[in-house]
Image (cartoon, rainbow, N blue to C red):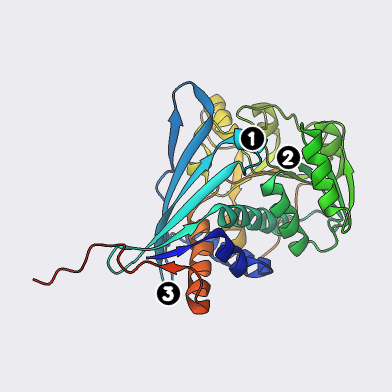
Amino acid sequence: MLIISNKAVQEVLVGRESEVITAVRQAYLRHAAGDSALPHSVFLRFPDDDRNRIIGLPAYLGGHEAVAGMKWIASFPGNVRQGLQRASAVIVLNSMRTGQPVALIEGSTISAWRTAAGAALAAAVLPAAQPATGVSLLGCGFINTEVLRFLRTVHPGIRKAALFDPDRGRAAAFARRWAGELDVTVADTAEAALAAHPLISVATTATSPHLDLAACRPGSLVLHLSLRDVPVDAVLAADNIVDDADHVCCAGTSLHLAEQRTGNRGFIRAALGDLLRDGAQHPRDPHRVTLFSPFGLGVLDLAVADLVLRDARRRGLGVELPDFLPPEQTG
């Protein structure tokens, strides 16, 4: 068993955004082709607690060297007030020959990077008529930090960012971190941020819809990463792209609520993997909002974790525990 810490994960990944995007793209393509197994995620919730949760995402991703495993990720929004990250995670990878666990990897960075890479892919495949020069970020935490970096990988012309966070201190700190690279403004309201740029990333800790999209410019792309922000009427008015309809229409997401109201999923136009398969761009509808709502598929975590494991082994990173498993039977 190889134990790979966050420090080692960072050492492997930093500066390799393009490789991560490629790995995530390949995972989407394999999933779209049916070369994956993706059971529904398991949500562990707690009595009298509607904010904290732990989610298990088991998955199998095929290919020349298939990989299987599971991400176990906790979301405790109150951590932020204590100076901790909201989410913490571990990823277990299993041998496809024996089924034995072969690696335990700290997963918070991998989870954030695969989320950001998926958002960047959507932004690349669903372009506006004009190249992106700015982005609006609602939620100034770890996820949107990574999303901004990855968006600049696929849209290097981004020079401006408009921020909104109910915690003005967090928004100000976010702005300071990027002030040397971008023209950053902090909006007074969510609506002002939505109106600032036609490329928008929403990564909040919301548990119920609160964000009307009426302020968005026609033709905007909203990367709805936190999944529960947008009211049903706004979902139904949008051009909806998802990562997997079966997975995203569950657990009280905005799209799940829309399905419950309409009794069907006809409001979903396509899955991102299907759009990627033809290798073409799919320009956004210039007259309405395009809403990308990714549940966050476990195959994406496996793709990035496998990249980390291979490079960590090559570079001698991590701590090997040779006696982690029971000894081999001899008789």
| Category of crowding for the residue at label 3, using alpha-carbon neighbours closer than 10 angstroms: few (below 14), some (14–19), many (at least 20) | few
Q: Secondary structure at mark 1?
A: loop
Residue 46 location, quadrant: top left
Q: Is there any visible trace of residue 118 in the rendered image?
A: yes
Q: Which residue is mark 3?
A: 64
Which amino acid does the dot numbered 3 rest on? His
Measured in 3D between alpha carbons, the distance from the residue under mark 2 to the one under mark 1, in whole angstroms, is 8 Å
- Toward the left, the furthest residue is 331
Amino acid type indicated by mark 1: Thr
In the visual, does 325 lie left or right of 112? left
Instruction: Specify the quadrant that holds the C terminus.
Output: bottom left
Residue 205: which numbered mark, if any? 1
The residue located at (67%, 53%) in the rendering is 119
Specify which label sits upstream in the sequence, 1 or 3.
Answer: 3
* Relative image position of residue 231 (x, y in whole percent): 67, 28
Q: Secondary structure at mark 2?
A: loop
The residue singled out by tag 2 in the image is: 139
Residue at the location (30% across, 63% down)?
Answer: 100
Instruction: Provide the secondary structure element on which disc 3 rests.
Output: loop
Q: Mark 2 near mark 1, Cβ–Cβ under 8 Å?
A: yes
Of residues 3 and 292, the one nearer the viewer is 3
Q: Quadrant of residue 205?
A: top right
In the picture provided, is 35 more to the left or to the right than 329? right
